[in-house]
Image (cartoon, rainbow, N blue to C red):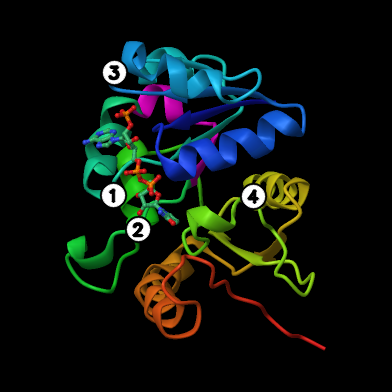
Amino acid sequence: MKIAIMGTGRMARGLAKGWARTGHTVHLGSRTPEAREETAQTIPTAAVSDHAAALEGADVVVIAIPYTAVEAFARRHAGQLRGKVVIDITNPFDNLPDNRVAGAEITATAIGAGARVVAAFKDNFWATLDQPASAEGIARDVHLAGDDEEAKQVVAGLAAELDFQPLDCGPLRNARILDSMVPLMIELDQRYARGQSQASWKLLAK
Ligand SMILES: NC(=O)c1ccc[n+]([C@@H]2O[C@H](COP(=O)([O-])OP(=O)(O)OC[C@H]3O[C@@H](n4cnc5c(N)ncnc54)[C@H](OP(=O)(O)O)[C@@H]3O)[C@@H](O)[C@H]2O)c1
């Protein structure tokens, strides 16, 4: 698949490295691609360009920019985002009007009809992207929420390729719960993982 990752920061680079390793073509989208050439060179097979060029021909798009920039980004590129599997990993924190809407729902509305948004990786710390299992060998969970079942399966497959445990958390509105789990995860990380961005969620179902 061609995976377009919007952003060139910690999450974008971590995911890009993983999916480049598992054989996908990864294209990073940047506001200043010329300044990010060196970053792209650290990721085998990855290229960097402006957002519109990176989105060209992508099967999957990952939005890995600050939440406050997402709605405008999604409106600007709605034509290119419609019909594609869009993974919204962004965390709104205190920037939501209230807790009755998820950041990913706002993204889907901004894209409009034909949006295939899956909220995922919101509560996976950047520092764990290259360590999908804990020291005890337990795979970290990746929570997914979305209304498009096929899109969720694609994202679950991509998470599993990186050796994470994908967990279908239901419809996109359940991303409201995921949004509020992120500040809690940071609190728990500070209390139990020395604030080293190592804490992860694990569902024990048996
Ligand atoms: N850090 C984590 O552990 C973590 C975990 C889960 C989810 N997230 C979410 O993932 C997203 C990225 O987090 P991160 O830690 O990777 O952030 P980061 O390291 O600060 O990188 C963000 C990237 O977004 C781009 N960017 C910055 N301001 C922008 C703007 N106004 N418009 C468009 N692009 C902009 C920049 O790339 P260019 O300069 O090349 O354009 C930058 O490299 C955030 O929404 C965050 O909430 C983070």
Give, as a single range, the part of the protein colored magenta: 78-87
Q: Amino acid at mark 4?
A: Asp
- Is 190 or 20 nearer to us in this picture? 190
The residue depicted at 54 percent of the width and 67 percent of the height is 198
- Asked if residue 85 is among those painted magenta in the image, a careful observer would answer yes
In terms of sequence position, does the residue under pointer 3 or pointer 1 come before the other? 3
Mark 4 vs mark 1: which is more N-terminal? Answer: 1
Secondary structure state at the residue bearing disc 4: loop
Task: Tell me the CA gap for discs 2 and 3.
Answer: 23 Å
Tell me the residue that label 1 is attached to: 67
In the drawing, what numbered circle is on residue 89? Answer: none
Q: CA distance from mark 3 to mark 1?
A: 18 Å
Identify the secondary structure beneath mark 1: helix
Q: Nearer the viewer, residue 99 or 32?
A: 32
Q: Amino acid at mark 1?
A: Tyr
Q: Which mark, residue 91? A: 2
Q: Using the image, determine if residue 99 lies above or below residue 29.
A: below
